[in-house]
Amino acid sequence: PQPLAFQPLPQLTPHQNAVLQKALEARDYFLLWGPPGTGKTNRLLKHLVEYLFRHSSQNILLLAYTNRAVDEICGALEEVLPEDSPGYLRIGSRYATAEPYRPRLLSLQLESIRTRKELRALIDGHRLVVGTLASFDNAREEMLALKKFDLVVIDEASQILEPQLVGLLTHFPKAILIGDHRQLPAVVQQAPHLTAIQDDQLKSIGLNDLADSLFERLFRRCRQQGWSQAFDILEEQGRMHRDLMEFPNRQFYDGILKTLPETLPTGLRQSAPLERSLPPDATALEKALASQRLLFLSTPIDLHSPTLKTNAHEARQVLHVLLALRRLFEASHQALDWSQVGIITPYRAQIALLKTTLAKAGLPADRLTIDTVERYQGGARDVIVLSLCTNALEQIDALVSLSSDGVDRKLNVALTRAREQLVVIGNAELLERNPSYAAFLAFLKEKGALCQTLSLEMNRETARP
């Protein structure tokens, strides 16, 4: 490491400042492991770029796997860059770029360029370039011929396979990779026996499986070799209430996660009790939702589902949960913000059934985000309802995505999207045959949050928009 006269930033906690300083001082590369809600983009990446922008003349390339993550990076940069600075250039398509960031697109700014001198001035005048890995690959040769970058920062690195990165990184003096190999990985179509490495020399450098990301391999390697200067872990998360954090922390993160200090408003929120007023004629479901942040509602399998990818019992239970939540908010003289309620389910067919069921009851299905766990990675809502839609034992394999160290990455992502309350709906008898779900159900029993016989009675009032 290169020692740095670093002044801690008041916007960060002591732990976050220590990690930031370590990333700045690292020489060739640095791996930042950011579990859910730890602010790897809107805290660490944002302030890393701000610090370097203000205290150096470095040119920085910022890449991510998805356009959604690039939009998030752009939003972070907009917050910290001086108003009188040229800002940043974004590489990519206007159709894949959120509207607020389209004026930053290189393609739009090139429309007014007439000479190579003007092009050079445009490129030289911007120290920050942002884009997806795919977008940069399309322009790599031209961009690297025009601009020398001192640093590349790659977000979502745990979703990028090694061949996509290893050649790219040779073009930069330093790389910072940010990711979480215990969340969803890159999509690989080949069977595990086809991606497994047999060569002993490759195994000796930790390359055991071609389905692993470069981030995951390097992180394991750094830990095994004791190269502590080259990696760190963000341990403070500011998303989940501590009651929702407890199981993922225990099961997926070896107990390292902490909520933010209670000296901060978010830290106070994360430790606050759940206090909701009850209507005079409250149902059993409403009473449970008023007092418990984590709840599992066991439902029957759907024997009439033609493809096994729908479950009408779960769809009705989701409806009951939303109606109950609305009644609880009304009892407290508040309006439920439907945009802060999300529903996660594994199948498109169940998404369609849920939308139909909610719309028929008069609920604003178009204001809810109903999607798969894959599309929820990186997102969060105050309340999450998880419909597991498991009607047969063989479906459990589709629910599970095990990492090399045995972590169920899909379950991890699903359980870490909620800030305030999480309701899980599924068939407990089927799910407990899987080790990951068996551990989750045992935890729920321990906490008194597993409801096998909770009444499914419909709310007394008629649903209304």
Image: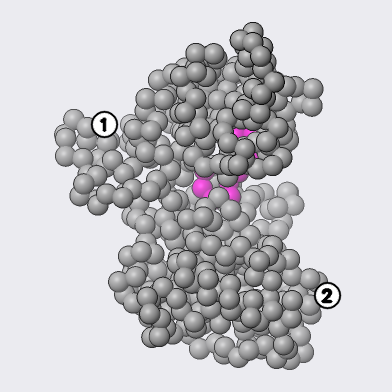
Question: Residue at horizontal 62%, vertical 38%?
Answer: 94
On the image, which quarter does residue 454 sit in? Answer: bottom right
Can residue 144 be seen in this snapshot? yes
Foreground pick, 323 / 450: 323
Q: Please indicate whether residue 371 sits to the left or right of residue 50 in the image.
A: left
Q: Is residue 36 magenta?
A: yes
Q: 324 above or below 64?
A: below
Q: Tag 2's secondary structure?
A: loop
Residue 205 numbered tag: 1
Give the Cα separation between the discs numbered 2 and 1: 60 Å
Q: Tag 1's secondary structure?
A: loop
Q: Please indicate whether residue 85 sits to the left or right of residue 400 in the image.
A: right
Q: Please indicate whether residue 389 sits to the left or right of residue 72 in the image.
A: left
- The scheme the figure's colours follow is one colour
State the residue position of label 2.
Answer: 333
Can residue 7 be seen in this snapshot? no
Q: 290 above or below 219?
A: below
On the image, which quarter does residue 292 sit in? Answer: bottom right
Mark 2 or 1 closer to N-term? 1
Q: Is residue 139 magenta?
A: no
Foreground pick, 112 / 227: 112
| Residue range of the region highlighted in magenta in the rendering | 32-46
Amino acid carrying mark 1 in the image: Ile
Provide residue 163's location: percent of width, then percent of height: 34, 33
Q: 122 above or below 204?
A: above
Provide residue 422's location: percent of width, then percent of height: 58, 68
Amino acid carrying mark 2 in the image: His
Provide residue 319's location: percent of width, then percent of height: 61, 79
Question: Residue at horizontal 30%, vertical 71%?
Answer: 394
Q: How many marks do you count on the picture?
A: 2
Provide residue 98's location: percent of width, then percent of height: 65, 43
**Location of the C terminus (image quadrant):** bottom right
